[in-house]
Image (cartoon, rainbow, N blue to C red):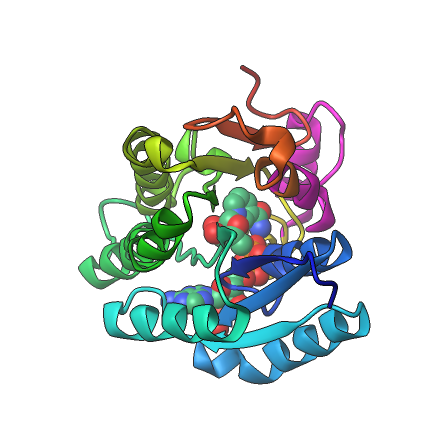
């Protein structure tokens, strides 16, 4: 750890995009609080060791982000361990496919609870500390699925659109406190979740063909945009949504 280390809390950090973001911040000199759900504690320990090997502090912060009491305890633990939280990356998310007509109510609830409510709960728990210091960077991982979406993912799309709307209003509420809030929308990224869209070779090819850069993304492709939005270079950017999708949704 360096005396000037910044601190970041990354949710869903045991694998995929969250793991890449956590390591990316450590490489940029941050101490990192690693959240995931309890069943991922072993994998989270591996990420923590990778961060310590980069000479940064790693704090394991288990919690189901959809449960308020767990989230409040997690944020208190991270603040006690790292002193404060400079940046939050709300990355934890789930995707359960199903068409609207047959979708089980419990699937709607789970996807909205983790993706949308989880983002809200983590931010709500961390805001008092950020406000007290007059500084904060919040980056919420939404999805191009929240803008366009794909069949069998209407509830996932709704959850990510909720994250974007929430972030736009949050930015207006907390700007006065020196806190920025932005979204990053990954495209098709090769992770355990991304494989849902990629297992079938024909579907995989069709996604590649729809992508200007003609390739599927790696988790590392998402890191730079997130780190930028958390950095001082992005001090005057808030309430925005940035696609990191190789050119699928063009705006
Ligand atoms: P992933 O490989 O499935 O990793 C997500 C991580 O979040 C897992 O470790 C998961 O644990 C954890 N998690 C799930 N529910 C949680 C909860 N309630 N509390 C805390 N942690 C929880 O997914 P990914 O592809 O890296 O996706 C990361 C983020 O990017 C998600 O928000 C996703 O919606 C978004 N995204 C992904 C893609 C893509 O193509 N991969 C595209 C656009 C957006 P369990 O597996 O044990 O549940």
Residue 94 lies in quadrant: bottom left
The residue located at (33%, 36%) in the rendering is: 174
> Horizontally, is 238 left or right of 21 in the view?
left
- Vertically, is 156 above or below 251? below
- Give how far across and how far down residue 178 sits, in percent: 42, 36
**Is residue 193 visible in the rendered structure shown here?**
no
Say left or right for 35 vs 163: right
Q: For the C terminus, which image quadrant?
A: top right
**Residue 249, percent across and down?**
55, 23
Front residue of 178/72: it is 178
Number of numbered markers: 0
Which sits in the foreground, 164 or 130? 130
Q: Residue at x 58, y 41 (%)?
A: 230
Q: Is residue 16 above or below residue 166?
A: below
Q: Position of residue 182 (x, y in %)?
A: 46, 35
Using the rendered view, name the quadrant where residue 228 is placed.
Answer: top right
Which residue is painted at 36% across and 65% down in the image? Answer: 65
Q: In the displayed image of the protein, which residue is found farthest to the left?
A: 105
- Residue 152 in the image, given as x and y percentages of width and height: 38, 45
Question: Magenta segment, principal secondary structure?
Answer: helix
Reply yes or no: does residue 85 show up in magenta: no
| Vertical arrangement, residue 122 with respect to residue 171, above or below | below
Bounds of the magenta segment: 200-226
State whether residue 72 appears in this view: yes
Q: 48 or 133: which is nearer to us?
A: 133
Check the picture and name the quadrant holding the N terminus: bottom right
Q: Where 121 sits versus 61, above or below?
A: above
Residue 206 highlighted magenta (yes or no): yes
The residue that appears at 34% across and 31% down in the rendered structure is 176
């Amino acid at each position: 750890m360096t005396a000037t280390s910044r601190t970041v809390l990354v949710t869903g950090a045991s694998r995929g995009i969250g793991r890449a973001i956590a390591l990316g911040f450590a490489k940029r000199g941050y101490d990192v609080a690693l959240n995931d759900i309890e069943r991922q504690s072993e994998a989270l320990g591996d990420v923590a060791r990778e961060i310590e090997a980069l000479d940064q502090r790693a704090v394991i912060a288990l919690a189901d982000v959809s449960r308020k009491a767990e989230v409040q305890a997690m944020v208190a633990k991270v603040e006690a361990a790292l002193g404060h939280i400079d940046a939050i990356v709300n990355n934890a998310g789930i995707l359960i496919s199903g068409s609207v007509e047959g979708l089980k109510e419990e699937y709607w609830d789970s996807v909205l609870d983790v993706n949308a409510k989880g983002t809200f709960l983590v931010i709500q728990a961390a805001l008092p500390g950020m406000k007290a210091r007059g500084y904060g960077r919040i980056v919420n991982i939404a999805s191009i699925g929240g803008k366009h979406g794909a069949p069998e993912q209407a509830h996932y799309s709704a959850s990510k659109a909720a994250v974007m709307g929430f972030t736009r209003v949050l930015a207006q509420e907390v700007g006065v406190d020196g806190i920025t809030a932005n979204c990053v929308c990954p495209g098709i990224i090769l992770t355990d979740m991304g494989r849902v869209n990629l297992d079938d070779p024909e579907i995989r090819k069709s996604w590649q063909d729809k992508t200007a850069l003609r390739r599927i993304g790696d988790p590392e492709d998402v890191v730079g945009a997130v780190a930028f939005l958390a950095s001082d270079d992005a001090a005057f950017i808030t309430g925005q949504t940035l696609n990191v999708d190789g050119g699928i949704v063009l705006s």
